[in-house]
Image (cartoon, rainbow, N blue to C red):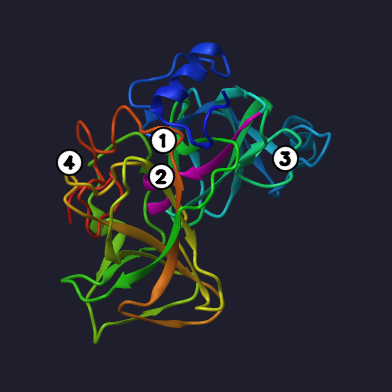
Amino acid sequence: MAEPPGILPCQAIEALAASGAIAAQAPLASGQVQPASLDLRLGARCWRVRASFLPGPGRTVAQRLSAVAMHELDLEKGAVLERGCVYIAELQERLSLPPDVAARANPKSSTGRLDIFVRLLTDGGQAFDDVAAGYRGPLHVEIAPQTFSVLARAGSRLNQLRLRRGAPPRTRVTTVGVDLTGPLAGFRARRHAGVIDLDREASIDPRDFFEALEPRRGELLLDPGEFYILASKQEVEIPLDQAAEMSPIDTAVGEFRAHYAGFFDPGFGLVSPGGQGSRAVLEVRSREAPFLLEDGQAVARLVFEPMAEPPRRAYGEGGSHYQSQGLKLSKHFRPW
């Protein structure tokens, strides 16, 4: 009997790891397997490159690196990845997927909230973040800090992998609007701030890196090239039998990009795992022209897909920095 299509839950991810379909240089760490995703860890080697690239059919990431690499960094010792630069890093995990299992990657929530542009690369890949069914090979990640320079190390977790069996249908698509009516409308990143240590939590004064924006008539003028943290108008709840991904709204709605980190695991926002309703935090960047954003305006879409089976543990069980969240910066910062 064929196994049902859908997003693979934590117990299936752990089974793939036990069978060798997911392998790593070091055993999977505590908390690395999420209810419907797997955190990926940086390896020891990282390269500053002069341009982003896709390997393309028949070529490996390592082969393409030889043409664009400028110098190598040792992440075992830790290295500063500077804003405005592009890097390619090895990941500790590699895959030998079954023929009916594919995967997709996304930045972790904390990565998106630091305005770090992160994309997964596979050998022979023709698209970022997508892993073909049955893929066998290493994984690399492109890292491009946009606003803040960051200190990264081997083992730092910047992106995550969601595995799916077959072609699960979309169960529903909802539109997410922005809330500009709270005590704070949002946060705008400061330029020329210091370095953020990716492996230290609740250690930074947020005022050194962001400025608070007061609500004004339910509007917010987005300046081109600036980075904003905003919150959704709606509370988001993800049932235990579904997972969701938030995707940017199309440019017909406005000249801006919203939400770089898009995975929502089963249980997010639910009362039973301690959620009591959670807002989606939106990472927003305006493009070429100033844009006047209004309260309630649609900025992203939430796409739901079925789980192959419910996860044995829900998002937020045992505590989470982002469960029951409102407008919130990344876990690296102390409370505002």
Residue of label 2: 243
| Quadrant containing the C terminus in the rendered view | bottom left
Q: Earlier in the sequence, mark 2 or mark 4?
A: 2
Q: Amino acid at mark 3?
A: Gly
Q: Earlier in the sequence, mark 1 or mark 4?
A: 1
Indicate the secondary structure of the residue bearing disc 4.
Answer: loop
Residue at image position (32%, 40%) is 240
Residue of label 3: 125
Q: Position of residue 236 (x, y in %)?
A: 29, 56
Q: Residues in magenta?
A: 100-113
Is 112 contained in the magenta span? yes
- Is 274 drawn above or below residue 42 in the view shown? below
Indicate the secondary structure of the residue bearing disc 1.
Answer: loop
Q: Amino acid at mark 2?
A: Ala
Q: Are marks 3 and 4 in contact (CB under 8 Å)?
A: no
Residue of label 1: 36
Mark 3 to mark 1: distance in Å? 23 Å
Indicate the secondary structure of the residue bearing disc 2.
Answer: strand
